[in-house]
Amino acid sequence: MDYPPTSLPKKEFMERARKMWEEEGLPSLKPKVPWYGYSLGNWTAEDEEEAELALKGEHYQTGKELARRRKKL
C-alpha cells in the first residue's frame, strides 16, 4: 500500500533530528520514503515566507500583516 502525501518537516529539520537521535545513542533508524517533507505544489511564496517567520519566532508579523489588510464593513 502506497503512503499518501503527508505533512512532514523539511529535510533539513529531519536530518538535524536524526543527528540528535544518533548523538543520544538511540537505536538505529530505518526511515522509509518519504522521511522528510517536500513541496506538493500547494504553497505560495507568501506561505513559505510566513513559515520562515514562524521558525524565527516572528509569527506575530503574519498577524500584523493580516490586520493591515483588513477592510471595514
Image: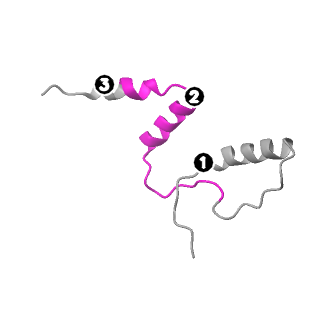
Instruction: Give the image location of residue 28, x and y in percent.
Output: 83, 56
Q: Write the residue at 79% across / 45% down.
A: 21
Q: Are marks 3 and 1 in contact (CB under 8 Å)?
A: no
Instruction: Give the image location of residue 41, x and y in percent.
Output: 46, 57
Q: Judge by depth and name the residue closer to the eye, 71 or 34.
A: 34
- Disc 2: which residue: 56
Q: Looking at the picture, which amino acid does disc 2 mark?
A: Lys
Q: Looking at the picture, which amino acid does disc 1 mark?
A: Pro
- Disc 3: which residue: 67
Q: Are marks 3 and 2 in contact (CB under 8 Å)?
A: no
Q: Judge by depth and name the residue closer to the eye, 49 or 27.
A: 27
CA gap between label 3 and label 2 equals 20 Å
Secondary element at tag 1: loop
CA gap between label 2 and label 1 equals 15 Å
In the image: residue 69, left or right of residue 65: left
Q: Write the residue at 77% across / 61% down.
A: 30
Q: Write the residue at 44% across / 24% down.
A: 60
In the image: residue 17, left or right of residue 48: right
Q: Earlier in the sequence, mark 3 or mark 2?
A: 2
Q: Earlier in the sequence, mark 2 or mark 1?
A: 1
Check the image and report above or below for 28 versus 15: below
Give, as a single range, the part of the protein colored magenta. Answer: 35-64
- Disc 1: which residue: 9
Instruction: Give the image location of residue 19, x and y in percent.
Output: 79, 45
Q: Are marks 2 and 1 in contact (CB under 8 Å)?
A: no
Within-10-Å neighbours for mark 2: few <14, some 14–19, many 20+: few
Q: Looking at the picture, which amino acid does disc 3 mark?
A: Ala
Quarter that holds the N terminus:
bottom right
Secondary element at tag 3: helix
